[in-house]
Image (cartoon, grey):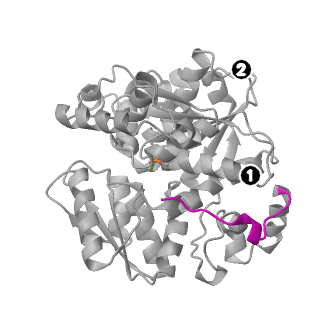
Amino acid sequence: MDVAYDWNSLPVPSHLREFEARWTQRRDPLAFSGIWRFHSLLPFAPPEQVVTIGEGQTLLQEANSVADYVGVKPGRLFLQYEGMNPSGSFKDNGMSAAFTHARMTGARRAACASTGNTSASLAAYCAVTRLMKAVIFIGSGKISYGKLSQALDYGALTVQIAGDFDDAMARVREVSRELGIYLVNSINPFRLEGQKTIMLRVLEALNWEPPDWIVVPGGNLGNSSAFGKAFMELKELGLIDRVPRLAVVNAAGADTLYQLWHDRRVRWNGGHPPKETIDEYFREMDERQAKASTIASAIEINRPVNLYKCLRALEFCDGMVCRVSDQEILDAKAQVGAGGIGCEPASGASVAGARMLRQIGAIEENERVVCILTGHQLKDPTATVAYHTTDQAKFNEVLGSRGVKRASFANRAVAVPNDLAEIVKAIQLYS
Ligand SMILES: *Cc1c(COP(=O)(O)O)cnc(C)c1O
């Protein structure tokens, strides 16, 4: 399902620059919001129904140390830091839109199955606005404390199912139907409407001049789908004349899109994607009982719900798909961290992917590249600490088990005796 507008009957700006005037009205929460400042490009809700908790105050940072790592010229690499959102990930972009739609339907409860950022985001919207009660379904597998702690702290009803994420997803669908609960999982098309604005903020930060590349991690493929839709609409409305190329990066342990794209040559094909080929792929995956596995938990997904929309985006944006190992993800993440903006492992995939596309010559050293950092560094401190640790057993437990062999850019703590002279000596030696 897709949200479509009859643009001819709607007021749209004649130039993107017109949005800048909204800044002068920023005491109005709808002008302050990084989503609803662009309301006329996602006009599905009347203003009085719109829900905002101040999301979208994000940063596009020129990152020269990361440019060097990726292999592009200084001033050519930018990090779009979505970790600055109220709940610490880009999910707030989509949630403010889906939550607004939930309110329009008169829902009193909203639910999702998620072990991560979606639940943290939903819990935050419910807690701040008090418009609805959040119901969160989690499996009994490993859960990042950084994310679970938010849902608990914000007072969401947290239902723990004896099963895995897929079981939780299946149950939340049934329960939502039975009890009339509004579902905010990734298949919800209104989430994508909110996520379109990430691209509007990128364009705004670049003085409305489209970059050459947008690089984004691919999990459920909501972001890539939303970015493509944003550019399709901007082009249709004559608000941009050039469309950036889109690169979607899978983790090697969760590479459905990569497999379909490269090995089975699946394409959107002008609206006629090969459904049989795709269905057959999933059948084979079930037969093998394949499970997604990557340290980047936010993209540890084998059945991306927005697959078709992502294929559409890839076609429109002349896109590419690549795949990176957990080793590459963590090394790239460490480079991002060393540049002063941390991110969670899934976000590191975008930088690792950009580096790979540079190495194969797809990205040129002069091109302007925007990597999306989808989530905050503190969302998954376990992976970060294990990477930098001096404790080999800890490293092996968290990372070695995933085939990560070395921490190429580790910044290790220095152990010293509790003695002034020794401490002074260590500081002089290491700094
Ligand atoms: C949800 C999430 C992703 C995956 O995004 P999709 O839109 O599902 O592809 C990536 N990174 C982080 C931090 C996330 O929370």
The part of the image, by quadrant, that contains residue 373 is: top right
Residue positioned 19% across, 31% down in the render = 288
Where residue 191 appears, x then y in whole percent?
A: 51, 61
Residue picked out by circle 2: 365
The alpha-carbon separation of the residues under discs 1 and 2 comes to: 30 Å
Residue 37 visible in the current orientation: no
User: Which is the main secondary structure of the residues drawn in magenta?
Assistant: loop
Tell me the kind of residue under disc 1.
Glu
Where residue 339 appears, x then y in whole percent?
A: 60, 35
Residue picked out by circle 1: 236
Q: Ligand 1: does it lie within 8 Å of the C-beta at label 2?
A: no
- Answer with left or right where residue 255 lies relative to residue 96: left
**SS at badge 2:** loop
Residue positioned 31% across, 33% down in the render = 281
Q: Which residues are magenta?
A: 1-15
Tell me the kind of residue under disc 2.
Glu
- Answer with left or right where residue 410 lies relative to residue 15: left
- Give the number of callouts: 2
Where residue 157 appears, x then y in whole percent?
A: 29, 73
Callout 1 crowding tier (Cα within 10 Å): few <14, some 14–19, many ≥20: few
Residue 256 visible in the current orientation: yes
Q: Earlier in the sequence, mark 1 or mark 2?
A: 1
Is 220 magenta? The answer is: no
Of the two numbered discs 1 and 2 in the rendering, the one whose residue sits closer to the viewer? 1
- Answer with left or right where residue 126 lies relative to residue 58: left
* Above or below, 40 relative to 249: below
Where residue 55 appears, x then y in whole percent?
A: 59, 64
